[in-house]
């Protein structure tokens, strides 16, 4: 009988200890999430006065391509322009930064088709594409997610919002509308699109 009571006591102590460790882990995870959200917010302290100095009128398409291109708003307007509706910019922290009724842009795959990625044969498809801004902010895409995945059907270089040029944010922005959080791959002040073959 005593043995049984001892056994039950040990079991109970173990159970209580396990619960404690669990709640400590949950607390630590919560703390980490909160501090990430705070640092994301701090990173958003954009000085509006600074924005104009980053505006780029031309976007260079370069790297491992056959036809280097210089994109301008006018040259994009001559391509296959699509209108995108009700698009939200959601930061990694979960904060909705902006909500845009109507945007106009050209598919990044259409631009890359025009520039023609320098593929040697059909198995040569390990490329990454960096969208780089004038403040050196950047977003990365892979060849496969653009050309062999639904993601690629929602990646655009946009140049107009609600019928207006982008001005302080632009003149061109890369957006990836099917991302879970659209903020990170929303590249304002786009300056270049760089294609690189993986070494
Ligand atoms: N060039 C550039 N693009 C950028 C950023 C930046 O610092 N520079 N910040 C990004 C972040 S973190 C978010 S959430 C969205 C929206 O940020 P905003 O509200 O500062 O425009 O833009 C993204 N695009
Ligand atoms: Mo963000």
Image: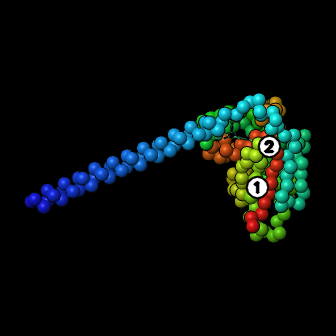
Report helix, strand or loop for mark 2: loop
> Is 61 on the left-hand or right-hand side of 151?
right
Q: Nearer the viewer, mark 1 or mark 2?
A: 2
Image point (32%, 49%), residue name: 19
Image point (37%, 49%), residue name: 22
Q: Is residue 136 above or below residue 122?
A: above
- Residue 171, located in which quarter of the rendered image? top right
* Disc 2 Cβ-to-ligand 1 distance below 8 Å: yes
- Residue 128, located in which quarter of the rendered image? bottom right
Would you say residue 175 is visible in this rendering? no
Residue 92 picture location, percent across and down: 61, 42
Residue 72 picture location, percent across and down: 88, 42
Q: How many marks?
A: 2
* Disc 1 Cβ-to-ligand 1 distance below 8 Å: no
Mark 1: few, some, or many residues within 10 Å (few <14, many ≥20)? Answer: many
Image point (70%, 34%), residue name: 46
Depth order, front residue of 148/10: 10
Q: Dot 1 corresponds to which residue? A: 129
Quarter of the figure with the N terminus: bottom left
Image point (39%, 47%), residue name: 24
> Is 42 on the left-hand or right-hand side of 168?
left
Q: Dot 2 corresponds to which residue? A: 134
């Amino acid at each position: 009988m005593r043995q049984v009571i001892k056994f039950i006591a040990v079991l109970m102590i173990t159970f209580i200890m396990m619960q404690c460790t669990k709640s400590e882990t949950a607390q630590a995870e919560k703390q980490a999430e909160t501090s990430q959200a705070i640092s994301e917010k701090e990173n958003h302290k954009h000085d509006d006065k600074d924005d104009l100095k980053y505006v780029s009128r031309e976007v260079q398409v370069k790297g491992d391509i056959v036809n280097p291109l210089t994109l301008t708003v006018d040259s994009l307007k001559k391509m296959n322009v699509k209108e995108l509706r009700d698009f939200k910019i959601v930061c990694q922290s979960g904060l909705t930064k902006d909500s845009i009724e109507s945007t106009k842009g050209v598919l990044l795959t259409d631009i890359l088709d025009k520039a023609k990625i320098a593929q040697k044969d059909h198995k040569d498809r390990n490329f990454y594409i960096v969208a780089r801004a004038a403040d050196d902010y950047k977003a990365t895409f892979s060849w496969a997610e653009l050309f062999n995945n639904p993601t690629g059907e929602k990646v655009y270089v946009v140049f107009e919002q609600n019928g207006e040029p982008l001005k302080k944010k632009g003149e061109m922005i890369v957006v990836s509308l099917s991302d879970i959080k659209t903020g990170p791959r929303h590249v304002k002040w786009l300056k270049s699109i760089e294609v690189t073959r993986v070494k």
